[in-house]
Image (cartoon, rainbow, N blue to C red):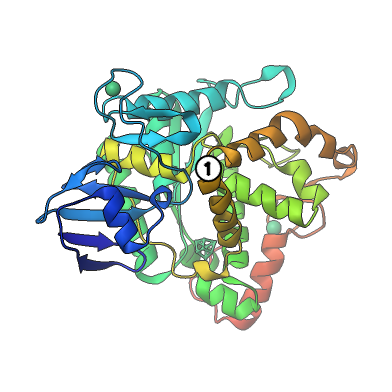
Amino acid sequence: MRVRLRNPDREVDVPGPRTVADLLDHLDVLPHTVLVIDDGELVTGGHELADDAQVEVRPVMSGGAENTLRCVVCRAPAAIEEPRHRAAWCLAHYPDHVVGQVRKAIDHPPSTAHNERMFSYADRLLIAVSGGKDSLALWDVLLQLGYRVDGLYVGLGIGGYSARSQEITEAFADARGARLHVVDLAEEFGYTTPSGSQAAGRSTCGVCGLSKRYTFNRTAVEHGYDVLVTGHNLDDEAATLLGNVVRWQDDFLARQHPVLPAGGGNQVRKVKPLYRLSERETAAYCLVRGIEYVVEECPLVDGNTGHELKSALDVLEAASPGVKAQFLFGFLDRHAEKFASDEDDDIRVGACTSCGMPTTGEVCAFCRQRDAIMKVLPVTQATA
Ligand code: SF4
Ligand SMILES: [Zn+2]
Ligand SMILES: [Zn+2]
């Protein structure tokens, strides 16, 4: 059989027939880190692959896998199992599971005052979309649920990776008649993620992250959106929590929550409705719903320490399915409040004297970073 593997993208021939579990064992791939697709269909560990099968082993992080092979809704053979939920679903019923988890996150965010919802049908939502599985899956779910939600794509200028991401995001929006804002860092601010990082002498992910957060908030403010939505999932949030705990960053722990209320001035409310779903679940949702997304990773990802934390949690999850969710939900439900400090209320947020966006100082971190970059880079088409 011909097997396509990703990251790096390659194909290998493996003698068959053999089961999916055998194949993964042969390839030395941990079952819970991948989805296996045989001729376009998701298949589980016991499925037999023919000698002439065309198989894709698609990486996702997290999850866990055992063979619970019947759909919990209709008892038909299951296409995907989630040991964390002690459940499995057929292709027809799997999307309902994902939509249900998003619904629960929106309607019952953990330990919010008066059980307030993340947002209502009256709100205008702006979702930050990267072309990856999480943000496109979430946009799809929110559109299905009938929310007023537009997209925002930020062009980071990371070569072919950015070009493909933008193309896929635009095709997604076009197919649904959804509105998509595109903000290109080079056109808007005069630098790309790689050139800005080189000029500022800072890590690419540092420059990239600050530029994205700033652009998300500023675009939401400029276009009058009520809520900014991001596709952070259970794996992202658990890894962030672990990073904050191992370094005991109390101030970050105080702000780790799927709902961050609007701050004074121009700070838009931020929410993370995917925090109950793993990367594996959102990847499977995209496959089942036929959503094309960018499978390749950002080529600059090596600078991102979050990956080591995710890998560490994956080891624990493989040994004990569900532990990742227990770690995150336990913190949010029972311990997050202990880190909330009154000091936050005392920090005065004002307007940046350069751009008017929120800052606790005089000039915001983004404007300071951009100034540092522009001192070194030749100004191209900067308009900001
Ligand atoms: S991996 Fe780093 S550089 Fe690449 S998109 Fe993410 S934050 Fe930006
Ligand atoms: Zn079913
Ligand atoms: Zn500023």
Q: Secondary structure at mark 1?
A: loop
- For residue 95, say whether it is visible: yes
- Exactly how many numbered labels are in the figure? 1
Closer to us: 172 or 66: 66
Disc 1 marks a residue whose amino acid type is: Asn
- Residue at 68% in and 18% down: 115
- For residue 167, say whether it is visible: no
For this view, does 375 lie left or right of residue 158?
right
Q: Is mark 1 within 8 Å of ligand 1?
A: no
For this view, does 296 lie left or right of residue 205?
left
- Position of residue 381 relative to residue 290, above or below, is below
Q: Quadrant of residue 78?
A: top left
Q: Extreme left residue here?
A: 52
- Position of residue 270 relative to residue 28, above or below, is above
For this view, does 167 lie left or right of residue 316?
left
- Residue at 55% in and 53% down: 315
Closer to us: 24 or 10: 24
- Residue at 37% in and 24% down: 96
Closer to us: 189 or 278: 278
Q: Quadrant of residue 27?
A: bottom left
**Residue 226: image location, x then y, percent:** 58, 32
Which class describes the residues within 10 Å of circle 1: few (<14), some (14-19), or many (20+)?
many
Quadrant (top left, top right, bottom left, bottom right) of the C terminus = bottom right
| Residue wearing tag 1 | 233
Quadrant (top left, top right, bottom left, bottom right) of the N terminus = bottom left
**Residue 305: image location, x then y, percent:** 61, 64
**Residue 204: image location, x then y, percent:** 57, 70
- Residue at 69% in and 55% down: 243
**Residue 301: image location, x then y, percent:** 50, 66
